[in-house]
Amino acid sequence: MRLSKMHLKTLREVPAEAEIPSHILMLRTGMIRKLASGVYGFMPLGWRTLRKIEEIVREEMDAAGGQEIHMSAIQPAELWQESGRWYAYGPELWRIKDRHGRDFCLGPTHEEIFTDIARNDISSYRQLPMNLYQIQTKYRDEARPRFGLMRSREFIMKDAYSFDRDQAGLDKSYDEMYAAYEKIFTRCGLDFRPVEADTGAIGGSNSHEFTALSEVGESEIAYCEKCSMAATVERAECADAPSQDDVEMLPMEEVHTPGTKTIEEVADFLKLDKNQTMKALLFVTYDSEGNEDGYVAAFVRGDRELNMTKLVNALGIPEHAIEFADEEKMGEATGCVGGFTGPVGLHDCKIVVDSELPGLKNLCAGACKEDHHLINVNYGRDYEGDIVTDIKVLAEGDPCPVCGAPVKHARGIEVGQVFKLGTKYSEAMKAYYKDENMKDHPIVMGCYGIGVTRTMAAIIEQHHDENGIIWPIAVAPYHVMITVMKPEDRVQAEIAEEIYQTLRKASVEVLIDDRKERPGVKFKDADLLGIPIRITVGRGAADGMIEYKMRRDADKTEMTVEEGIRKAIDTISSEK
């Protein structure tokens, strides 16, 4: 492709709306074009890279036995109502009506559609296992779209669905997809880590998230260097503090603690360590009609943080069905007092207690009375929980729940996730098969997603410098950039054309910068666009010499035209 003919508009200044490198660089290179908040179109260079990522995904999915189909992004509400997700998915589900008033949604994912295919097309165990996938546009009505393609309202996703006769079959399908994902992200040039993850609105029993390591990522992961434990922080289990069985329970006492609403204030006032206190967090929940459904008081040790995902899972409600309560209003109904709430004396609310609190003795908690706390509060004698389970965050430095070594944290970008759905959708939607004895069984399912557009952003986050993008060869929009210093110079033009045509015949994707621009502009654009190999045709052309440079390296080398062509072909064939 000749740059003089390409539809390309690069920007010198950083766009005001862009905050992270991938968003900045995709706008500056003209790879994407914003249409509305969280909605982007793809221009020639961006679309070429996106198609290359799709092709890597397609090749590995096909190699793993997947069969590609393409379903509509418009989905009838009836299918989502069958599965129970019309309400559970919440406000991110982009709901629409047709002219007849019939409800539809723009699909954020396709579990219901693929389950509908299975129940209509699969009747016998002989048809199992099966894996169907698609690469298609998805929609989520994000409340706060940001970071360009990282959190957008329209995006391209590969979603696959496996269908098996039993759990053993699902385990095999899951492992095959897990291995395919490792190959896909490795070929895309990503530094990634698979970690245990929460199943969220998708549901199921087990899940792993594939996280591209990056400081700008919204996913926080906890991992252990001494063992194989790795999980998203929202999913990571916590080891409870050792139970204090040998500690004697002391008599509970009420103490005056004026103006001490925070854990830090009350611990300082009473000369206690924060791990000898109990923290209360107050919530209101809502039913499927959006009406208040009840109050929840969650309790964790004072030096801990509440894990909202674990709390939501413990309550068995969607994420959107809970929010912090109005303390005054909740106080009238339950007896809580903002800043001074404890579990003793609370009524008419669900009490959720973190799993380590029952094993601890003589804790300090709010007295449900202004400017007062209780000391020597003990589980079983003084209070009980409606639900007792792990609802705390696994913090950096906490002991690993597997081996006890200190846990570390890292940030990353979720680029893919795999789920063991089991029979969640097949039972709800009556997708059954008949076994050898003509007995009906629910199909056992798995689902497997890759954010194709987000993967593109993650690659840029990991492969850039202060001058622009540094594309891995496998996903670069073009392999080679030929920069002609003086296109009007006959010798330079002829040599550039020779290199261009020779590389094209060797199936190398080439851009030739034949624009009548200053050399400085051309070099800046070459660095910005990040094409992996740059061949410069300049003053040495008269002697048959060119300058060869890899975008990822600082050094450049002078060599003959023939050497440059051969080196480019060899490099691309070895790294493609």
Image (cartoon, helix red, strand yellow):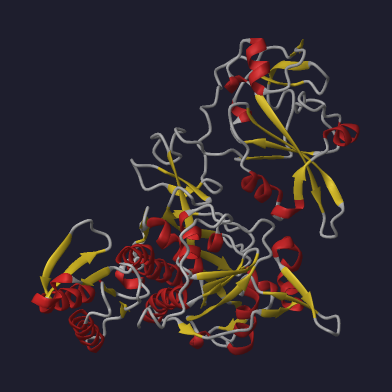
Quick one: quadrant of the C terminus? Answer: bottom left
- Residue 494's quadrant in the figure? bottom left
Quick one: quadrant of the N terminus? Answer: bottom left
* x, y percent for residue 118: 59, 83
| In the displayed structure image, the side of residue 162 where residue 520 appears, left or right | left
Question: Residue at 79% of width from left, 48% of height from top?
Answer: 285
| In the displayed structure image, the side of residue 305 where residue 125 appears, left or right | left
The one nearer the camera, 501 or 393, is: 501
| In the displayed structure image, the side of residue 114 where residue 332 appears, left or right | right
Question: Residue at 64% of width from left, 61% of height from top?
Answer: 201
* x, y percent for residue 142: 67, 61
Question: Residue at 38% of width from left, 63% of height from top?
Answer: 528
Q: Give the residue furthest to the right.
A: 332
- Residue 143's quadrant in the figure? bottom right
* x, y percent for residue 338: 80, 28
* Residue 267 visible (yes or no): yes
* x, y percent for residue 113: 64, 79
* Residue 416 visible (yes or no): no
Question: Residue at 73% of width from left, 22% of height from top?
Answer: 261
